[in-house]
Amino acid sequence: MVKAGASGAGGGAGGGASGKEEIAAWSMTQAAAGLARGEVTSRQLTEIMLERIAASDNNAYITVNPQALAEADAADARRRAGKARSGADGIPVALKDNICVRGLPTTCASRMLANFTPPYSAAVAERLAEAGTVLLGKLNMDEFAMGSTSEHSYFGPVKNPRNPARVAGGSSGGAAAAVAEDLAYLALGTDTGGSVRQPAAFCGAVGLKPTYGRISRFGVVAFASSLDQVGPITKTVADCAWALSLLAGGDPRDSSSLPHPPADYIAGLRGVAGLADAGGSGYGGGGGNGGGRGSDGDGGRDTYGNGTVFGAGQGGRPRIGVPREYMGEGIQAEVRRAVSDLAAKMAAAGAAVEECSLPRAEYALSAYYVISSAEACSNLGRYDGVKYGYRANNYDSLEDMIRRSRSEGFGDEVKRRILLGTYTLSAGYFDAYYKRAQQARTLIMEDFRQAFQRYDALLIPTSPVTAWRRGADFADPSAVYAMDLCTVSVNVAGLPAISLPWGTDGDGLPIGAQLIGAPLSEALLLRIAHGAEELGAAVNSRRPNAGIGTGPAVGAARDAGAGSAASPASGSASSTGAGSAADAAGDAGAGRSEGGRLDG
Amino acid sequence: MKITRETVIRVAGLAKLALTEAETERLTHEMGKIVEFADKLAELELTAVAPTTHAVQMENVYRADELKPSYPREEILANGPERDDTCFLVPKAVDGEGPEW
């Protein structure tokens, strides 16, 4: 790891009422409140983060920003002058290493891009900089975002902060581990098939995958262009809502970004009260959100409809569907019980919760892997050792140079996906795979469309299992792919979804519950998630849900900081029967581990 | 579909990947498993179903055709593995004497 920035991190931080540990554990909202009150400076926050990054061995960071402290000082100067750019001015954040920042390496955790320094910044990096945030560095990941463990990294695997012998999840494993270990107040990941939500679930953080196109992807290295979306990983739902409001919006440089004006994602957060009232007309901001996308000019195929989909619930109770396809066989028993427990508590809090069905759910994984690999093989065609990236040392022709550069520059998982994608697009197989996958996509979307005529959100696990052992030996790659069961259909259908921690399993590993919404329903989704989070304060051990439920969470932050309920944890309150033998899927990864790894 | 060694070699050629013997062996097995996984799609009756390319239907997006500065040449060339002052360099790709420029 390049730790250029860490050298400047001295002591002196964290004086006053709060100790360093406590400050590090703050949510983004709390940190903003601390800055607003003058209790801490951005330099102090940044020094604390840099010290922790330097001391951590979870391998969450690939590059530390040598300018971090200078950025913090500039933020402090703005604030002193009464010219803070936003409530987030001075908050230390970090970006997954497939998000370009001008002048800093963007490696995608690949040998291919180990020496690549982009000449421009991603739209999301610009937006965060415009808000005044301090960039701590670039986060580890699976190579080119392909993987579910963050072990497929040229810079070594990320360790799960809850248990270093376990994977952090992936592909945004560094982002989730950084937030969970208090190495950043906000991290941005990317989610092509679950890569924000699943690592957030594995590490006990909150991860939001917005509607496809809600956030500009300009400057984000492409994996699968019809699926990729940037998403925040944070400690709380309110932080996620805040991050989304900093990031959402159209961008002429990304023609797939949605021009719809972002909603107010923060105003509607009501804690548990949000579970008894979906927010009436236009929940939390209305206008551009949720409505207005009825007819898509597709000959009457009412893609997810609009007004009629929502608001029909009696008394404005949010209606939650729990699709049985994601609550049965193949789901670790403790995970199933945790999600059932959340469903019951949401119902008790006033939501209308019922079982439902997504009949074509079982085809989502196959469709996802065909579509994503096909798009990946196309996107990765650009790596040829000519304009940027790795070039082999020895070759005897242009063709040979390209072939050797790609073969030496890409890791195994990337090669597998390229080969699968090339195969499914090649003559004679296109109709059998790629076209069929796109047809299946139509059916999967139709299932969701129907579900969202009845429900405001769907509740399922984020992952069928909790974090497995690093170095676990799966029978073959498709066995690992199957672990993406609960996340991929959301990308295939372009939907928003959020993962939040809900208790732990018998080994103390976090369980993630996932709420899925209709396109552009983020405001409502966050409102429901905010209620669920407050219900979960008792079952979520490490993260005390600080700063939520104290009214309008934000205008930012102003109030939240003080009341950091450090509600201690009841360990695995929601998990019953630890070590249940029924956890068939959970054992899938429990095989041997490779030598040389830290775990046994 | 059955994945053979020949399939893997052919596809690797299309993808501009050179595989070692061991890689070819391993990938033949792995690709077989993955394709089996993808073959599940064959169960679906799809004759009357239109394919979806993008989950969110968008009209074509246009922009004004305006003159704007591009990125500075030096910054773009800076990432080139081999370059001179104005160009990326690659091995000679065309045989024989070219036309005089």
Image: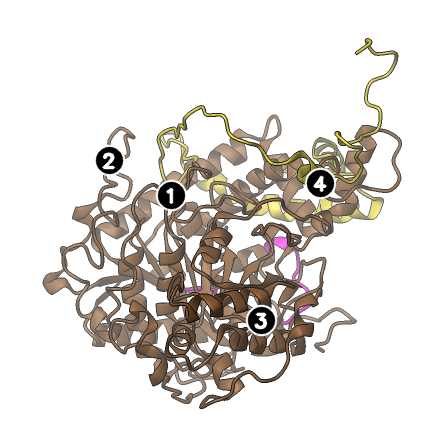
What is the drawing colour of chain B? Answer: yellow
* Image disc number at residue A250: 1
- Disc 4 to disc 2, how far (Cα)? 43 Å
Query: Mark 2 or mark 3, which is nearer the start of the sequence?
Result: 2
- Specify start and end residues of the magenta stretch as a single range: A461-478
Q: Quadrant of the C terminus of chain A?
A: bottom right
> Does residue A342 appear left or right of residue A24 in this picture?
left
Residue depth check, mark 3 versus mark 2: number of the one nearer the observer:
2
Left or right: residue A8 compared with residue A274: right
Query: Relative to residue A411, is residue A570 depicted above or below?
Result: below
User: Which callout, 4 or 2, points at the residue further toward the start of the chain?
Assistant: 2
Earlier sequence position, callout 4 versus callout 1? 1
Which residue is labeled 4 in the image?
Answer: A388
- Checking the image for residue A321, the label placed there is none
Residue at left 44%, top 59%? A486
Q: Give SS at disc 2.
A: loop
